[in-house]
Image (cartoon, helix red, strand yellow):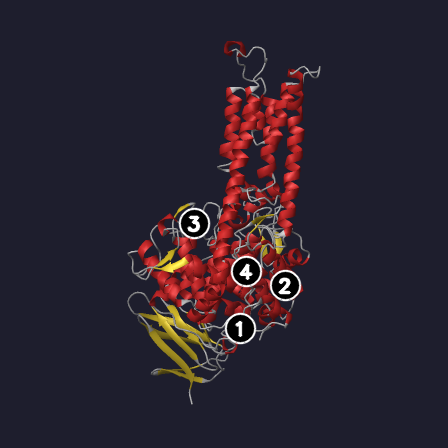
Amino acid sequence: MTNVELLTSRFAALPRIGETGPQSGFNGKRMTALGRRTRLIHAALCVIGLAPFALWLLYLLKLVSFKVPPQLVAVGFGLVVPGGGFIACGEPVTVAIGLFICFWLWKKRGMMIQDFLGSFMGIVGFWALGAAGGLLAFGWYSWDYAAFGLAPFGYAPWGYAAAVGTAFALFVPYELQVRRMYKQMSAARDERLPLFDDAVAELDAATGDRSIVGEKEFRQNGGGVRSGDTAKEPGADELDDEQLLAARYLLEATVREKGDFDGFEHLFGLADYRYQLSVYGYGLMLLHAKYLPNFEGYLKKAHRFLIESYSDPRTCGYWAKQAKVGYLSNNPDPIVKANVMLSGWMMPVVAGYRDQYGDDEYEKEASIRFQPFADKPEETYDYNSAGVFGVLYRQYKNHEYPYMLIPCEPHVAFPACNSVALLGMLVYDRDHGTDYCAGFWDELYDNLQSDFIEIDGTMALRRQYQYGLRHLPSSQIGYMPLADVQNYMHFSAIFPGLARRCYALVRKTLLSIDADGAAQVNGQPWDMMFNMFTMKPDPSTQIAMLELTAAEYGDLPVYDALRVAESRFLAKSKDPTSFKFKDVNSLTVAYIALARLIKKGYWSDVILRGMPETSKTGPVLTDCPFPDVIPAKASSSGDDLDLVLTTSGEPVAAGIRIERLKPGARYAYGAGAFTADADGAATLTVEVGRRTAIHIVPEA
């Protein structure tokens, strides 16, 4: 077993629902403490903000002799509710502005502002704007109050009542929504507790494994490996026709020159290409390790394109703005702090390059030069693989954030982004023979299971690190146990027992198979499924995430049923040589392509065990023409090279190059033979049809 297999196998047992998540209430201890602090701060702001209003009432009742300036009263209401200062001014225009701030900017668009511009300015900024509005806007639009019988007041006290009403109209529904969510979670927990053993048994029956249940006792006894979680035999599979289309899709997106982003999509909220680059990269890593371990050529070129694209300003430049707004920092370095949505997502691709090709290119100093500004090419922030790893390690080891996981957008942490960061760190540790991950793994598990697991046993989509309240931002409201089901695939290599437990519960209680063999999400039609990539009803991403997760667990009954649902709701391209789907974005298609390539345990195997040994010692195909020829298989059992070459069109005479042969040795393939040159290489011309097998072996 590799060092990282030994580390992660200690977490192979499935914890029962009561062993994880909040031990009382609905939130972990740290989140509860932050929420209590936030409520106290808001209560203090309300007391301070309403004090001028109270003094105004006392003056109106002739209980005090001094008159509070109406501007001060309006400013106070700005501390109570976003936009309150404008509303308290009482003028039609200012009330309209205040209501716009409160119910459109804050309630409707605030989640987006808070998630993508930073939760500090995105939340505190609203309060500051409302308070400033009371000071600046008072009296800038004059009303004739006498005409409305309000002359005794001298200004519009009804604005004060409107501000109070607005506060109730904003915050009471939030609290009710959160309580409804808690009620749903409680009902889900009550449903799952008696079904737990059945859920695990049914998943085991589908996958051929035997799970170990009872996480605490298992860890106390030193851990181990569950049945079925064993190293895979060396060798490689051959891509079938559908997998070939998936591979071609990934390669056509990535076999290109540095800076060429033609065809990449600018997805709202998922812009700047970082996620597309990463999912393409995971697909290429799996393609290389499991199907083409003895092929480099343009596959290696594609891997380099991905790494070099992370440093392009179109990929990393967004952080300069987010750091300024979210952390009040002028440092545009996209790696040094937080931003695991870049550093984390790229880590498996960066660490995987050396692991898969034995090439130290990105181990060199300043080999990855991040350029945040397109108009300032001289301003770069220089890293290498160890540098990116070191920043991630520092943040985890030093526990720099409240619940330990590294934030993506400022102050907002997603288990999904952290999962890929951790996968990349495992690859780095295994490839370099180091044990950095072991230094924080136990503490990380304790933080994850206590603060990112809900009471029903599923994994939370996100957590906010400043406020501890579900409605700050409101994107945390809502019971969405399938929102990021890819977590259960990625965490299967990190904390396998917890991930398997989560998937078993989702599989048992949320998924079913209808009479036509199609997977269904209980209680939610596929065509009403909300897609967080496109921000509209669209089942494509949910289907893709479930497919790749079921495939990784070897859950063929669910995977096959998901494929039926896919055929029903996603329209494939009419071009038989294309892997694309109608109205499905490129990121989701990349996930579907990845799902096509995964078989049971493949992704965990790529992370924890890496490439077959013969990929580093046996002959290797280093060149064939792209896109005319794509290998469906390239592997070696020692001194041979087993190739299956394909073309999507007419047969072609293709030049191929083989290296890592024995210098001067004779080799045979089919009816032909050749002699390796003094460098152990040979260039051949072969006829390639739809699927051509070429087995190169030393002559006897």
Residue to which mark 4 is pinned: 17
Residue to which mark 2 is pinned: 441
Please tell me in which quadrant of the rendered image residue 450 appears: bottom right
Residue to which mark 3 is pinned: 265
Q: Residues within 10 Å of mark 2 (few under 14, many from 20)?
A: some
Residue beneath the point at 64% across and 41% down: 38
Alpha carbon separation for disc pair 2 and 1: 19 Å
Residue beneath the point at 43% across and 57% down: 510
- Inspect the image, locate mark 1, and give the three-letter code of the amino acid beneath it: Arg
Q: Residues within 10 Å of mark 1 (few under 14, many from 20)?
A: some
Q: Residues within 10 Å of mark 4 (few under 14, many from 20)?
A: many
Tell me how many marks there are: 4
Question: Can you see residue 320?
Answer: yes
SS of the residue under disc 1: loop
Residue to which mark 1 is pinned: 226
Name the quarter where the C terminus is drawn. Answer: bottom left
